[in-house]
Image: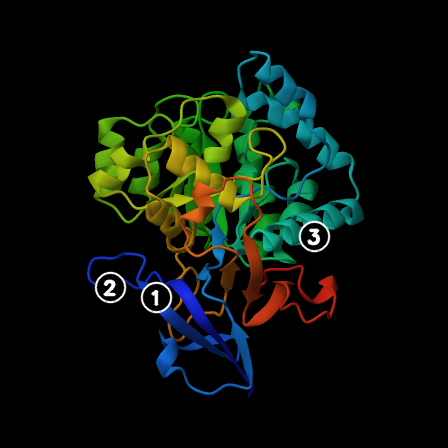
Amino acid sequence: MSATLITNIGELTTNVEIDGDRCGTVHDAAVLIEGGRIAWVGAASEAPDADEVVDAGGRAVIPGFVDSHSHLVFGGDRAAEFEARMAGQKYAAGGIRSTVAATRAASDEELRARLHGFIDEMLAQGTTTVEIKSGYGLSVADEERLVRLAAEVTPEVTFLGAHVVPAEYADHADDYVDLVVGPMLDACALHAKWIDVFCETGAFTVPQSRRVLEAGIARGLAPRVHASQLSPGEGVRLAVELGAASVDHGTYLTDDDVSALAASDTVLTLLPGVEFSTRQPYPDARRLIDAGVTVALACDTNPGSSFTSSMPFCIAIAVRDMGMTPAEAVWASTAGGARALRRDDVGVIAPGARADLVLLDAPTRIHLAYRPGVPLVERVWKDGVAVFGAAHDGRGTEDHDSLTR
């Protein structure tokens, strides 16, 4: 079994806590990769021999980003909607229906090609693990194909049939919930790991959301929840009550919400790209972290409210506008995302973990926020294989355009 040594790392972020440093920062470090896993981590001066040696040149290495909230399988475009918001129109959940129409009209081949394009885009920006939701089909056949296509590129697939009520059920929301928890769940559960619901004004009520989540749990799917994006509500406490791995958005949180999250193991996943694109107020991450809430950052890549796939961009916003330090934002984008997916094999650089690493063209992770918009990702390894940058082995994108482990 061949081994690769990445050495002369100026700053290594391991996310294995060292003396109160949650990022587990090691200077003048090296990492040994064997069989797609991390085999050794330590000082460069003590590094073992390897078949291949990569000189990091004193630059920083971090774990691959774990993007725990995305909607990558869809058709169409909503640029006009974005332009209208920038002119003052208020964001509302109902815009999802226009994407539903475009998605239903797209072929599997069109959706698959676009999905793989997004995966390539994410890899080039350092994302090595991604969760993908359905939610733009909203019929049995279309939701099934969205989760099926998502499962081709990631194991972290979420059935989000309860995204909004489709137009044909506009006056019969409870009938649509019957469809979601019955035939639609039957068709989608085989391809999914998670069940999600948009518990929000303009989407689904708390009782409807409970029905959806409990039906998914009964089928072996683990819960996650969209909540408190547009206004305060009871979605956060429902998520905590049902043991959701993550509750996402959290733009409007009450003190009771924060207390409930802090006392639970439910991660709050913040989505800075949404507030950037909708001009809603940014959540106060400082308030959450200081209260003891576990925070993750994710892109929420979607055509309506956050059409970005860049975790570095989200890190920069979180530092600039949400009260996070660069170290906290990088942790939330790696280890925090892993916790939101209840994974301990990604988001960390430690023996036994998957060898998902990012070499930055910078001396420190601080540059991710310090130099916003600059492409600082120099090289990316996924399961020990170079998938982006100078270390790419040239086998072609067909070998690398999925994040299936």
**Percent from the top left, x then y, of residue 151?**
62, 56
Callout 3: few (<14), some (14-19), or many (20+) C-alpha neighbours within 10 Å? many
Query: Mark 2 or mark 1, which has the lower sequence index?
Result: 2
Residue tagged by mark 2?
Answer: 18
Mark 2 residue type: Ile
Looking at the image, do the residues carrying marks 2 and 1 touch, with CB atoms under 8 Å apart?
no
Q: Residue at x 46, y 87 (%)?
A: 49
292 is higher (above) or lower (below) than 76: below
Q: Residue at x 42, y 86 (%)?
A: 48
Q: Residue 27's mark?
A: 1
20 is higher (above) or lower (below) than 350: above
Q: Residue 96's mark?
A: none
Which of the two marks, 2 or 1, is nearer to us in this view? 1
Mark 1 residue type: His
Q: Residue 116's mark?
A: 3
**Mark 2 and mark 1: span between their CA atoms?**
12 Å
Is residue 405 among what the camera can see?
Answer: no
In front: 396, or 31?
Answer: 31
Q: Which residue is drawn at 70% across and 67% down?
A: 399
390 is higher (above) or lower (below) than 315: below
Callout 1: few (<14), some (14-19), or many (20+) C-alpha neighbours within 10 Å? some
* SS class, disc 3: helix
**Mark 1 and mark 3: span between their CA atoms?**
36 Å
**Percent from the top left, x then y, of residue 379?**
57, 62
